[in-house]
Amino acid sequence: MKTQDCIFFQLSRASRAGARFWQQKVAPYGVTSAQALVLLSLSEKDQVKSRHIGEQTELDSATLAGLLDRLASSGLVERRPNPDDRRAILVCLTEQGEKIAGRIQAIVEIENQAFLSALTPEEGLILKSLLKKLG
C-alpha cells in the first residue's frame, strides 16, 4: 500500500490543513487555535471548572492548565473561587474574553463552510457525520 492510500496519512494531512486554516482565522484575535476552542467552550457555558472545559475540548489537564494560564495572562479569563465548593476554582471569561469569544463564535460557521468549500453541502454533512462516528 502506498503512503498516500493510508487512511491515517489522509486523516493526519486533513487535520494539519484544518489546524493551519483555523489558526489563520483566529490569529487576528490574538489567540492560538487551541485557545480559541477554550474561549468557544466558555462562550457556550461560562463559570465552569477546568475539568468541564477539558471534557468539551478533549484537552488533557496539563495542556489545558497552560492554555488557561496564558489566557489569564492575556486578560481573557480569570479563575474565581467556587461559591459552592471552596476547594474548587471556576474559570470565567473576562469582559475582554467575552468580546473575543463572541467574535470567534461569529466566524465559526462561516469558516467551517469556507474550509469545506471544496465539498458539496451534502458531502460536508457526510464528512462531519463520519468524523463524529470515528471520534
Image (cartoon, grey):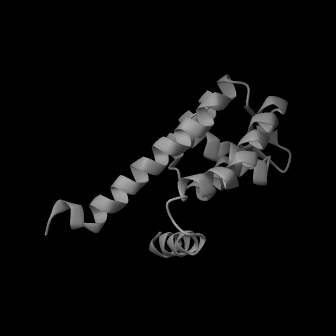
Q: Nearest the camera: 115 or 45?
A: 115
Q: Nearest the camera: 81 or 72?
A: 72
Q: Position of residue 76 (x, y in %)?
A: 73, 31
Q: Can the viewer see residue 64 in this picture? A: no
Within the image, what quadrant is residue 28 found in? top right
Q: Nearest the camera: 118 or 34?
A: 118
Q: Decide if residue 1 is on the left or right side of residue 10.
A: left
Q: Decide if residue 36 is on the left or right side of residue 66.
A: right
Within the image, what quadrant is residue 79 found in? top right
Q: Position of residue 67 (x, y in %)?
A: 57, 36
Q: Position of residue 25 (x, y in %)?
A: 60, 39
Q: Can the viewer see residue 66 in this picture? A: yes
Q: Position of residue 3 (x, y in %)?
A: 18, 61
User: Residue visible at 76% across and 40% down?
Assistant: 103
In the image, residue 125 above or below residue 61: below
| Tag count | 0
In the image, residue 96 above or below residue 84: above
User: Residue visible at 49% across and 75% down?
Assistant: 130
Q: Decide if residue 34 is on the left or right side of residue 88.
A: left
